[in-house]
Image: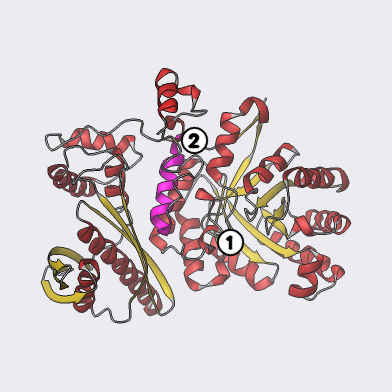
Amino acid sequence: MARQIKIFDTTLRDGEQSPGCSMNLQDKLTVAESLASLGVDIIEAGFAIASPGDFKSVQAIARNIRGVTVASLSRALEKDIDASWEAIRDAESPRIHTFLATSPLHMEYKLKKTPDQVYEQAVAMVAYARNLCGDVEFSLEDASRSDLQFMYRVIEGVIAAGASTVNIPDTVGYAVPEEFAALIHSIRNNVPNIDKAVISVHCHNDLGLGVANSLAAAMAGADQIECTVNGLGERAGNAALEEIVMNLYTRKEYYNMTTRIDSTKLWQASKRVSKATGVRCQPNKAVVGENAFAHESGIHQHGVLANRATYEIMTPESIGLPHNKMVLGKHSGSHAFEERLSYLGYRVSEERLKELFDAFKNLADKKKTVSDRDIDAMVGGSLRGIPEAFKLDRFVINSGSSITATSVVRLELRDGSKVEKVAIGDGPVDASLNAVDKIIGGSEIKLEDYSLQIVDATDTGADAQGETHVRISRDGRTWNGGGVSTDIVESSIMAYLSAINAMLFELEQEKTRSAS
Protein backbone atom coordinates (compact mmCIF):
# COMPACT_ATOMS: atom_id res chain seq x y z
CA MET A 1 0.00 0.00 0.00
CA ALA A 2 1.32 3.44 -0.95
CA ARG A 3 2.58 5.58 1.91
CA GLN A 4 0.86 8.97 2.16
CA ILE A 5 3.08 12.06 2.22
CA LYS A 6 1.77 15.22 3.85
CA ILE A 7 2.10 18.37 1.76
CA PHE A 8 2.95 21.47 3.79
CA ASP A 9 2.51 24.49 1.54
CA THR A 10 4.41 27.65 2.46
CA THR A 11 3.60 29.76 -0.62
CA LEU A 12 1.94 32.40 1.56
CA ARG A 13 4.95 32.61 3.92
CA ASP A 14 8.24 31.59 2.31
CA GLY A 15 6.90 32.17 -1.20
CA GLU A 16 5.79 35.70 -0.37
CA GLN A 17 9.28 36.44 0.96
CA SER A 18 10.54 36.33 -2.63
CA PRO A 19 11.50 39.85 -3.75
CA GLY A 20 8.50 41.44 -5.46
CA CYS A 21 6.03 38.70 -4.48
CA SER A 22 3.99 40.57 -1.87
CA MET A 23 0.24 39.89 -1.83
CA ASN A 24 -2.63 41.83 -0.29
CA LEU A 25 -5.21 40.26 2.00
CA GLN A 26 -7.70 39.45 -0.76
CA ASP A 27 -4.97 37.85 -2.90
CA LYS A 28 -3.85 35.71 0.06
CA LEU A 29 -7.39 34.54 0.75
CA THR A 30 -7.84 33.63 -2.91
CA VAL A 31 -4.58 31.65 -2.92
CA ALA A 32 -5.48 29.97 0.40
CA GLU A 33 -8.85 28.89 -1.00
CA SER A 34 -7.09 27.48 -4.05
CA LEU A 35 -4.61 25.57 -1.85
CA ALA A 36 -7.40 24.11 0.28
CA SER A 37 -9.27 23.05 -2.87
CA LEU A 38 -6.05 21.55 -4.21
CA GLY A 39 -5.85 19.30 -1.16
CA VAL A 40 -2.74 20.43 0.70
CA ASP A 41 -2.55 19.16 4.29
CA ILE A 42 -1.08 22.26 5.90
CA ILE A 43 -1.10 25.89 4.80
CA GLU A 44 1.59 28.05 6.38
CA ALA A 45 -0.38 31.28 6.23
CA GLY A 46 2.43 33.63 7.20
CA PHE A 47 4.74 34.99 9.89
CA ALA A 48 2.22 36.54 12.28
CA ILE A 49 4.60 38.79 14.20
CA ALA A 50 6.31 40.16 11.07
CA SER A 51 3.81 43.00 10.62
CA PRO A 52 0.22 43.97 11.45
CA GLY A 53 -0.68 43.09 7.86
CA ASP A 54 0.82 39.62 8.18
CA PHE A 55 -1.05 39.05 11.43
CA LYS A 56 -4.37 40.09 9.86
CA SER A 57 -3.89 37.85 6.83
CA VAL A 58 -2.94 34.81 8.95
CA GLN A 59 -5.94 35.45 11.17
CA ALA A 60 -8.29 35.85 8.19
CA ILE A 61 -7.09 32.60 6.63
CA ALA A 62 -7.43 30.78 9.97
CA ARG A 63 -11.00 32.01 10.34
CA ASN A 64 -12.17 31.44 6.78
CA ILE A 65 -10.37 28.41 5.33
CA ARG A 66 -11.63 24.97 6.38
CA GLY A 67 -10.59 21.39 5.75
CA VAL A 68 -6.87 22.10 6.22
CA THR A 69 -4.39 22.77 9.03
CA VAL A 70 -3.36 26.45 9.21
CA ALA A 71 0.10 27.23 10.58
CA SER A 72 1.95 30.40 11.51
CA LEU A 73 5.72 30.64 11.69
CA SER A 74 7.45 32.07 14.77
CA ARG A 75 10.96 32.38 16.05
CA ALA A 76 11.67 30.47 19.25
CA LEU A 77 10.59 33.46 21.32
CA GLU A 78 7.55 33.83 23.57
CA LYS A 79 6.34 37.03 21.86
CA ASP A 80 6.47 35.35 18.42
CA ILE A 81 4.68 32.25 19.66
CA ASP A 82 2.00 34.37 21.37
CA ALA A 83 1.39 36.30 18.13
CA SER A 84 1.13 33.07 16.14
CA TRP A 85 -1.36 31.58 18.57
CA GLU A 86 -3.55 34.70 18.59
CA ALA A 87 -3.59 34.66 14.78
CA ILE A 88 -4.43 30.95 14.31
CA ARG A 89 -6.44 30.08 17.39
CA ASP A 90 -9.74 30.23 15.45
CA ALA A 91 -8.54 27.78 12.79
CA GLU A 92 -10.30 24.44 12.43
CA SER A 93 -6.88 22.81 12.89
CA PRO A 94 -4.21 25.26 14.14
CA ARG A 95 -0.45 24.65 14.22
CA ILE A 96 2.37 26.70 15.73
CA HIS A 97 5.58 26.38 13.73
CA THR A 98 8.66 27.59 15.58
CA PHE A 99 12.32 27.42 14.60
CA LEU A 100 15.87 27.96 15.81
CA ALA A 101 19.20 27.59 13.97
CA THR A 102 21.39 24.63 14.90
CA SER A 103 24.43 24.89 12.59
CA PRO A 104 27.75 26.03 14.11
CA LEU A 105 27.86 28.92 11.62
CA HIS A 106 24.43 30.26 12.56
CA MET A 107 24.85 29.69 16.29
CA GLU A 108 28.16 31.56 16.42
CA TYR A 109 27.55 34.46 14.04
CA LYS A 110 23.77 34.96 14.01
CA LEU A 111 22.51 33.76 17.37
CA LYS A 112 25.77 34.29 19.30
CA LYS A 113 24.79 31.38 21.54
CA THR A 114 26.46 28.18 22.66
CA PRO A 115 24.99 24.80 21.65
CA ASP A 116 23.73 24.28 25.22
CA GLN A 117 21.94 27.64 25.14
CA VAL A 118 20.34 26.79 21.78
CA TYR A 119 19.21 23.40 23.09
CA GLU A 120 17.64 24.93 26.21
CA GLN A 121 15.88 27.64 24.23
CA ALA A 122 14.51 25.18 21.66
CA VAL A 123 13.11 22.81 24.31
CA ALA A 124 11.68 25.62 26.45
CA MET A 125 9.94 27.34 23.53
CA VAL A 126 8.43 24.11 22.19
CA ALA A 127 7.06 23.41 25.67
CA TYR A 128 5.69 26.98 25.81
CA ALA A 129 4.01 26.58 22.40
CA ARG A 130 2.64 23.15 23.34
CA ASN A 131 0.82 24.69 26.32
CA LEU A 132 -1.05 26.92 23.86
CA CYS A 133 -1.60 24.61 20.89
CA GLY A 134 -1.90 20.86 20.55
CA ASP A 135 -0.01 20.80 17.24
CA VAL A 136 3.56 22.15 17.34
CA GLU A 137 6.22 21.88 14.64
CA PHE A 138 9.88 22.64 15.32
CA SER A 139 12.45 23.41 12.61
CA LEU A 140 16.21 23.08 12.99
CA GLU A 141 17.27 25.94 10.73
CA ASP A 142 20.30 25.12 8.53
CA ALA A 143 20.03 21.45 9.53
CA SER A 144 21.98 20.24 6.51
CA ARG A 145 25.07 22.03 7.84
CA SER A 146 24.55 21.08 11.50
CA ASP A 147 26.49 18.63 13.66
CA LEU A 148 24.74 15.26 13.67
CA GLN A 149 25.13 14.49 17.36
CA PHE A 150 23.84 17.94 18.32
CA MET A 151 20.87 17.52 15.98
CA TYR A 152 19.96 14.18 17.56
CA ARG A 153 20.02 15.82 20.98
CA VAL A 154 17.83 18.77 19.91
CA ILE A 155 15.33 16.58 18.07
CA GLU A 156 14.97 14.24 21.04
CA GLY A 157 14.54 17.20 23.39
CA VAL A 158 11.88 19.05 21.38
CA ILE A 159 9.87 15.86 20.81
CA ALA A 160 9.93 15.19 24.56
CA ALA A 161 8.76 18.81 25.07
CA GLY A 162 5.74 18.30 22.81
CA ALA A 163 6.72 18.78 19.15
CA SER A 164 4.59 16.51 16.97
CA THR A 165 6.49 17.41 13.77
CA VAL A 166 10.24 17.94 13.43
CA ASN A 167 11.38 19.73 10.30
CA ILE A 168 14.84 19.20 8.79
CA PRO A 169 15.47 22.15 6.44
CA ASP A 170 18.12 22.43 3.79
CA THR A 171 17.91 26.17 4.39
CA VAL A 172 20.51 27.28 1.86
CA GLY A 173 20.15 24.48 -0.70
CA TYR A 174 23.52 23.00 0.18
CA ALA A 175 22.64 19.29 0.31
CA VAL A 176 22.71 16.72 -2.47
CA PRO A 177 20.10 13.93 -2.67
CA GLU A 178 22.17 10.95 -1.47
CA GLU A 179 23.62 13.00 1.40
CA PHE A 180 20.24 14.38 2.44
CA ALA A 181 18.63 10.92 2.35
CA ALA A 182 21.46 9.63 4.54
CA LEU A 183 20.76 12.47 7.00
CA ILE A 184 17.10 11.43 7.32
CA HIS A 185 18.15 7.78 7.74
CA SER A 186 20.56 8.72 10.50
CA ILE A 187 17.91 10.73 12.36
CA ARG A 188 15.47 7.82 12.18
CA ASN A 189 18.11 5.46 13.53
CA ASN A 190 19.66 7.64 16.24
CA VAL A 191 16.83 9.60 17.90
CA PRO A 192 15.16 7.29 20.47
CA ASN A 193 11.72 8.97 20.43
CA ILE A 194 11.55 9.78 16.70
CA ASP A 195 8.54 7.47 16.36
CA LYS A 196 6.51 10.04 18.31
CA ALA A 197 6.89 12.74 15.65
CA VAL A 198 6.53 13.26 11.91
CA ILE A 199 9.79 13.99 10.09
CA SER A 200 9.41 16.89 7.68
CA VAL A 201 11.82 18.41 5.14
CA HIS A 202 12.07 21.91 3.69
CA CYS A 203 14.49 22.16 0.77
CA HIS A 204 15.66 25.29 -1.00
CA ASN A 205 16.70 25.35 -4.62
CA ASP A 206 19.99 27.27 -4.63
CA LEU A 207 21.71 24.47 -6.59
CA GLY A 208 18.55 23.35 -8.42
CA LEU A 209 18.12 20.29 -6.18
CA GLY A 210 15.13 21.30 -4.04
CA VAL A 211 12.72 18.74 -5.52
CA ALA A 212 15.35 16.00 -5.81
CA ASN A 213 16.41 16.44 -2.17
CA SER A 214 12.78 16.44 -1.00
CA LEU A 215 11.98 13.21 -2.84
CA ALA A 216 15.19 11.55 -1.64
CA ALA A 217 14.25 12.47 1.93
CA ALA A 218 10.76 11.03 1.48
CA MET A 219 12.26 7.79 0.18
CA ALA A 220 14.43 7.75 3.30
CA GLY A 221 11.43 8.03 5.60
CA ALA A 222 10.31 11.68 5.79
CA ASP A 223 6.50 11.86 5.93
CA GLN A 224 6.00 15.57 5.25
CA ILE A 225 7.39 17.75 2.45
CA GLU A 226 7.35 21.54 2.67
CA CYS A 227 7.07 23.27 -0.70
CA THR A 228 5.55 26.16 -2.64
CA VAL A 229 3.43 26.57 -5.76
CA ASN A 230 5.65 27.46 -8.75
CA GLY A 231 8.70 26.92 -6.52
CA LEU A 232 8.51 30.47 -5.13
CA GLY A 233 10.72 31.37 -2.20
CA GLU A 234 13.73 33.30 -1.04
CA ARG A 235 16.74 33.46 -3.38
CA ALA A 236 16.36 30.61 -5.91
CA GLY A 237 13.11 29.45 -4.31
CA ASN A 238 11.79 26.26 -2.71
CA ALA A 239 10.96 22.79 -3.88
CA ALA A 240 8.02 23.18 -6.27
CA LEU A 241 4.78 21.58 -5.08
CA GLU A 242 3.60 20.69 -8.57
CA GLU A 243 6.88 18.95 -9.42
CA ILE A 244 6.84 16.88 -6.24
CA VAL A 245 3.22 15.84 -6.73
CA MET A 246 3.65 14.90 -10.39
CA ASN A 247 6.84 12.94 -9.65
CA LEU A 248 4.90 10.81 -7.17
CA TYR A 249 1.94 10.58 -9.58
CA THR A 250 3.89 9.80 -12.77
CA ARG A 251 6.42 7.42 -11.17
CA LYS A 252 4.10 5.85 -8.59
CA GLU A 253 5.51 2.38 -9.25
CA TYR A 254 8.95 3.66 -8.22
CA TYR A 255 8.13 5.85 -5.23
CA ASN A 256 5.09 3.94 -3.91
CA MET A 257 3.98 7.16 -2.23
CA THR A 258 0.92 9.32 -2.66
CA THR A 259 -0.56 12.64 -1.52
CA ARG A 260 -4.02 14.15 -0.99
CA ILE A 261 -3.42 16.58 -3.86
CA ASP A 262 -5.96 16.71 -6.71
CA SER A 263 -3.46 16.97 -9.56
CA THR A 264 -6.12 18.23 -11.98
CA LYS A 265 -6.14 21.51 -10.05
CA LEU A 266 -2.39 22.15 -10.27
CA TRP A 267 -2.56 24.30 -13.41
CA GLN A 268 -5.25 26.52 -11.94
CA ALA A 269 -3.39 26.88 -8.63
CA SER A 270 -0.24 27.87 -10.50
CA LYS A 271 -2.08 30.56 -12.44
CA ARG A 272 -3.80 31.89 -9.31
CA VAL A 273 -0.44 32.29 -7.57
CA SER A 274 1.09 33.94 -10.64
CA LYS A 275 -1.74 36.45 -10.79
CA ALA A 276 -1.67 37.15 -7.06
CA THR A 277 2.10 37.74 -6.96
CA GLY A 278 2.54 39.23 -10.42
CA VAL A 279 5.38 36.75 -11.00
CA ARG A 280 5.03 34.42 -13.96
CA CYS A 281 6.69 31.04 -14.43
CA GLN A 282 9.48 30.75 -16.96
CA PRO A 283 8.18 29.09 -20.17
CA ASN A 284 10.23 25.91 -19.67
CA LYS A 285 9.14 25.44 -16.04
CA ALA A 286 8.45 21.77 -15.34
CA VAL A 287 4.77 20.72 -15.17
CA VAL A 288 3.12 24.18 -15.30
CA GLY A 289 5.32 26.18 -17.70
CA GLU A 290 3.82 27.44 -20.94
CA ASN A 291 5.98 25.02 -22.93
CA ALA A 292 5.58 22.00 -20.64
CA PHE A 293 3.18 20.38 -23.13
CA ALA A 294 4.24 22.21 -26.29
CA HIS A 295 5.85 20.40 -29.22
CA GLU A 296 7.53 22.35 -32.02
CA SER A 297 9.95 19.82 -33.51
CA GLY A 298 8.46 18.01 -36.50
CA ILE A 299 9.74 14.67 -35.20
CA HIS A 300 8.12 15.32 -31.82
CA GLN A 301 4.84 16.44 -33.39
CA HIS A 302 4.71 13.31 -35.54
CA GLY A 303 5.37 11.10 -32.52
CA VAL A 304 2.74 12.78 -30.35
CA LEU A 305 0.13 12.54 -33.09
CA ALA A 306 0.86 8.83 -33.46
CA ASN A 307 0.92 8.17 -29.71
CA ARG A 308 1.05 10.88 -27.05
CA ALA A 309 3.21 8.69 -24.80
CA THR A 310 6.12 9.05 -27.23
CA TYR A 311 6.95 12.50 -25.87
CA GLU A 312 4.47 13.07 -23.03
CA ILE A 313 5.09 11.18 -19.79
CA MET A 314 2.01 12.84 -18.29
CA THR A 315 -1.05 14.31 -19.96
CA PRO A 316 -2.11 17.97 -19.92
CA GLU A 317 -5.44 16.83 -18.48
CA SER A 318 -3.68 15.26 -15.48
CA ILE A 319 -2.72 18.74 -14.22
CA GLY A 320 -5.97 20.40 -15.31
CA LEU A 321 -4.64 22.01 -18.47
CA PRO A 322 -7.41 22.27 -21.09
CA HIS A 323 -6.32 20.24 -24.08
CA ASN A 324 -8.18 22.11 -26.77
CA LYS A 325 -9.09 25.61 -27.79
CA MET A 326 -12.23 27.36 -26.62
CA VAL A 327 -14.95 27.19 -29.29
CA LEU A 328 -17.29 29.72 -27.72
CA GLY A 329 -17.89 32.81 -29.82
CA LYS A 330 -20.13 35.84 -30.02
CA HIS A 331 -23.19 33.65 -30.70
CA SER A 332 -22.68 31.50 -27.59
CA GLY A 333 -25.14 31.74 -24.70
CA SER A 334 -24.56 32.30 -21.00
CA HIS A 335 -25.23 28.64 -20.14
CA ALA A 336 -22.37 27.42 -22.32
CA PHE A 337 -20.14 30.15 -20.91
CA GLU A 338 -21.03 29.20 -17.32
CA GLU A 339 -20.26 25.53 -18.03
CA ARG A 340 -16.86 26.47 -19.42
CA LEU A 341 -16.10 28.56 -16.33
CA SER A 342 -16.93 25.55 -14.19
CA TYR A 343 -14.64 23.35 -16.28
CA LEU A 344 -11.82 25.85 -15.76
CA GLY A 345 -12.35 25.69 -12.00
CA TYR A 346 -14.14 29.01 -11.38
CA ARG A 347 -17.17 29.40 -9.09
CA VAL A 348 -18.72 32.85 -9.29
CA SER A 349 -21.90 34.56 -8.09
CA GLU A 350 -24.78 35.29 -10.48
CA GLU A 351 -23.91 38.98 -10.43
CA ARG A 352 -20.29 38.28 -11.26
CA LEU A 353 -21.33 35.78 -13.94
CA LYS A 354 -23.33 38.49 -15.71
CA GLU A 355 -20.37 40.88 -15.61
CA LEU A 356 -18.04 38.23 -16.94
CA PHE A 357 -20.45 37.16 -19.66
CA ASP A 358 -20.74 40.75 -20.86
CA ALA A 359 -16.93 41.00 -20.90
CA PHE A 360 -16.76 37.70 -22.79
CA LYS A 361 -19.20 38.99 -25.42
CA ASN A 362 -17.12 42.13 -25.88
CA LEU A 363 -14.01 40.01 -26.30
CA ALA A 364 -15.77 37.67 -28.73
CA ASP A 365 -16.63 40.67 -30.90
CA LYS A 366 -12.92 41.46 -31.16
CA LYS A 367 -11.61 37.92 -31.64
CA LYS A 368 -12.54 35.23 -34.15
CA THR A 369 -11.93 32.53 -31.56
CA VAL A 370 -11.66 32.76 -27.77
CA SER A 371 -9.36 30.23 -26.11
CA ASP A 372 -9.49 28.81 -22.61
CA ARG A 373 -6.36 30.86 -21.88
CA ASP A 374 -8.26 34.00 -22.90
CA ILE A 375 -11.07 33.10 -20.52
CA ASP A 376 -8.64 32.25 -17.74
CA ALA A 377 -6.84 35.58 -18.12
CA MET A 378 -10.09 37.54 -18.26
CA VAL A 379 -11.69 35.85 -15.26
CA GLY A 380 -8.58 35.56 -13.12
CA GLY A 381 -8.10 39.31 -13.02
CA SER A 382 -11.64 39.87 -11.82
CA LEU A 383 -11.60 37.50 -8.85
CA ARG A 384 -9.55 39.60 -6.49
CA GLY A 385 -12.65 40.91 -4.71
CA ILE A 386 -11.38 44.51 -4.75
CA PRO A 387 -13.89 47.32 -5.40
CA GLU A 388 -13.00 49.63 -8.28
CA ALA A 389 -12.40 53.14 -6.99
CA PHE A 390 -11.32 54.01 -10.53
CA LYS A 391 -12.41 52.29 -13.74
CA LEU A 392 -11.29 52.99 -17.31
CA ASP A 393 -14.04 54.62 -19.36
CA ARG A 394 -12.14 55.56 -22.52
CA PHE A 395 -8.79 56.76 -23.85
CA VAL A 396 -7.42 58.41 -27.01
CA ILE A 397 -3.80 58.18 -28.13
CA ASN A 398 -1.79 60.44 -30.43
CA SER A 399 1.67 59.00 -31.04
CA GLY A 400 4.33 58.62 -33.70
CA SER A 401 8.06 58.53 -34.38
CA SER A 402 8.27 62.28 -34.95
CA ILE A 403 5.87 63.59 -32.26
CA THR A 404 5.62 63.39 -28.50
CA ALA A 405 3.09 60.79 -27.41
CA THR A 406 -0.11 62.26 -25.97
CA SER A 407 -2.90 60.42 -24.20
CA VAL A 408 -6.36 61.54 -23.13
CA VAL A 409 -7.77 59.23 -20.47
CA ARG A 410 -11.22 59.34 -18.90
CA LEU A 411 -11.89 57.37 -15.70
CA GLU A 412 -15.17 56.55 -14.01
CA LEU A 413 -15.12 57.13 -10.26
CA ARG A 414 -16.86 55.09 -7.58
CA ASP A 415 -19.77 57.54 -7.43
CA GLY A 416 -20.38 57.26 -11.17
CA SER A 417 -18.85 60.61 -12.11
CA LYS A 418 -16.20 60.81 -14.82
CA VAL A 419 -12.90 62.71 -14.91
CA GLU A 420 -10.72 63.27 -17.97
CA LYS A 421 -7.09 64.39 -18.18
CA VAL A 422 -4.44 64.69 -20.89
CA ALA A 423 -0.73 63.96 -20.49
CA ILE A 424 2.42 63.40 -22.52
CA GLY A 425 5.04 60.71 -22.11
CA ASP A 426 7.74 58.55 -23.64
CA GLY A 427 5.33 56.52 -25.72
CA PRO A 428 1.59 55.83 -25.55
CA VAL A 429 1.72 53.64 -22.41
CA ASP A 430 3.81 56.12 -20.42
CA ALA A 431 1.56 59.00 -21.52
CA SER A 432 -1.56 57.06 -20.52
CA LEU A 433 -0.24 56.19 -17.07
CA ASN A 434 0.79 59.82 -16.58
CA ALA A 435 -2.78 60.85 -17.41
CA VAL A 436 -4.08 58.38 -14.82
CA ASP A 437 -1.69 59.86 -12.25
CA LYS A 438 -3.10 63.31 -12.96
CA ILE A 439 -6.64 62.12 -12.30
CA ILE A 440 -5.92 60.26 -9.08
CA GLY A 441 -3.19 62.57 -7.77
CA GLY A 442 -0.68 59.74 -7.95
CA SER A 443 2.58 61.69 -7.66
CA GLU A 444 3.70 59.43 -4.79
CA ILE A 445 3.10 56.24 -6.78
CA LYS A 446 6.09 54.66 -8.50
CA LEU A 447 5.89 52.05 -11.25
CA GLU A 448 8.33 49.34 -10.11
CA ASP A 449 7.75 46.67 -12.74
CA TYR A 450 5.92 46.27 -16.04
CA SER A 451 5.55 43.17 -18.20
CA LEU A 452 3.45 42.33 -21.24
CA GLN A 453 2.90 39.06 -23.07
CA ILE A 454 0.43 37.40 -25.41
CA VAL A 455 -2.20 35.44 -23.49
CA ASP A 456 -2.29 32.50 -25.89
CA ALA A 457 0.97 31.72 -27.66
CA THR A 458 -0.96 30.26 -30.59
CA ASP A 459 -2.49 33.67 -31.34
CA THR A 460 -0.33 35.53 -33.84
CA GLY A 461 -2.84 37.81 -35.54
CA ALA A 462 -4.19 41.27 -34.77
CA ASP A 463 -6.84 39.81 -32.44
CA ALA A 464 -4.32 38.35 -29.97
CA GLN A 465 -4.82 39.47 -26.38
CA GLY A 466 -2.08 41.20 -24.44
CA GLU A 467 -1.82 40.50 -20.71
CA THR A 468 -0.08 43.21 -18.70
CA HIS A 469 1.27 42.87 -15.15
CA VAL A 470 2.48 45.87 -13.16
CA ARG A 471 3.88 46.44 -9.70
CA ILE A 472 3.56 49.83 -8.04
CA SER A 473 5.05 51.13 -4.80
CA ARG A 474 4.27 53.86 -2.32
CA ASP A 475 6.00 54.57 0.99
CA GLY A 476 8.04 51.38 0.68
CA ARG A 477 5.01 49.08 0.12
CA THR A 478 4.11 47.34 -3.13
CA TRP A 479 0.91 46.23 -4.89
CA ASN A 480 0.36 44.16 -8.03
CA GLY A 481 -2.18 44.58 -10.81
CA GLY A 482 -3.13 42.90 -14.07
CA GLY A 483 -5.11 43.73 -17.19
CA VAL A 484 -6.05 41.92 -20.39
CA SER A 485 -7.12 43.40 -23.72
CA THR A 486 -6.56 43.09 -27.44
CA ASP A 487 -5.12 46.62 -27.16
CA ILE A 488 -1.84 46.74 -25.23
CA VAL A 489 -2.36 50.35 -24.14
CA GLU A 490 -5.77 49.45 -22.75
CA SER A 491 -4.41 46.37 -20.95
CA SER A 492 -1.63 48.57 -19.50
CA ILE A 493 -4.07 51.16 -18.16
CA MET A 494 -6.28 48.40 -16.73
CA ALA A 495 -3.31 46.75 -14.99
CA TYR A 496 -2.19 50.09 -13.53
CA LEU A 497 -5.70 50.81 -12.25
CA SER A 498 -5.95 47.29 -10.84
CA ALA A 499 -2.83 47.90 -8.73
CA ILE A 500 -4.04 51.35 -7.66
CA ASN A 501 -7.45 49.96 -6.64
CA ALA A 502 -5.70 47.23 -4.64
CA MET A 503 -3.58 49.86 -2.90
CA LEU A 504 -6.55 52.11 -2.06
CA PHE A 505 -8.65 49.19 -0.84
CA GLU A 506 -5.90 47.94 1.49
CA LEU A 507 -5.22 51.43 2.87
CA GLU A 508 -8.93 52.01 3.44
CA GLN A 509 -9.21 48.66 5.25
CA GLU A 510 -6.28 49.58 7.50
CA LYS A 511 -7.81 52.98 8.24
CA THR A 512 -11.14 51.37 9.15
CA ARG A 513 -9.45 48.87 11.47
CA SER A 514 -7.48 51.66 13.17
CA ALA A 515 -10.64 53.71 13.71
CA SER A 516 -12.40 50.75 15.31
The answer to which quarter of the image holds residue 172 is bottom right
User: Disc 1, disc 2: CB below 8 Å?
Assistant: no
Whether residue 18 sits left or right of residue 160 in the image: it is left
> Which quadrant would the N terminus be assigned to in this image?
top right
> Residue flagged by tag 1: what amino acid is it?
Arg
Residue under pointer 2 = 263
Whether residue 235 sits left or right of residue 452 in the image: it is right
The dominant secondary structure in magenta is: helix
Tag nearer the camera, 1 or 2: 1
Residues in magenta?
263-279
Residue at image location 55% in from the left, 60% down from the top: 13
Question: Compared to 437, does 412 lie above or below?
Answer: above
Question: Compared to 147, does 420 lie above or below?
Answer: below
Label 1, residues with CA under 10 Å away: few <14, some 14-19, many ≥20: some
Label 2, residues with CA under 10 Å away: few <14, some 14-19, many ≥20: some
Give the number of the disc on residue 460: none
Query: Which structural element holds mark 1?
Result: loop
Position in image of residue 344 (x %, y %): 34, 38
CA separation, marks 1 and 2?
Answer: 27 Å
Residue at image location 78% in from the left, 68% down from the top: 105
Q: Earlier in the sequence, mark 1 or mark 2?
A: 1
> Residue flagged by tag 2: what amino acid is it?
Ser
Position in image of residue 22 (x %, y %): 46, 64
For residue 114: magenta? no
Whether residue 332 sits left or right of residue 303 in the image: it is left
Position in image of residue 235 (x %, y %): 58, 61
Residue under pointer 1 = 235
Position in image of residue 46 (x %, y %): 54, 61
Answer yes or no: is residue 405 visible. no
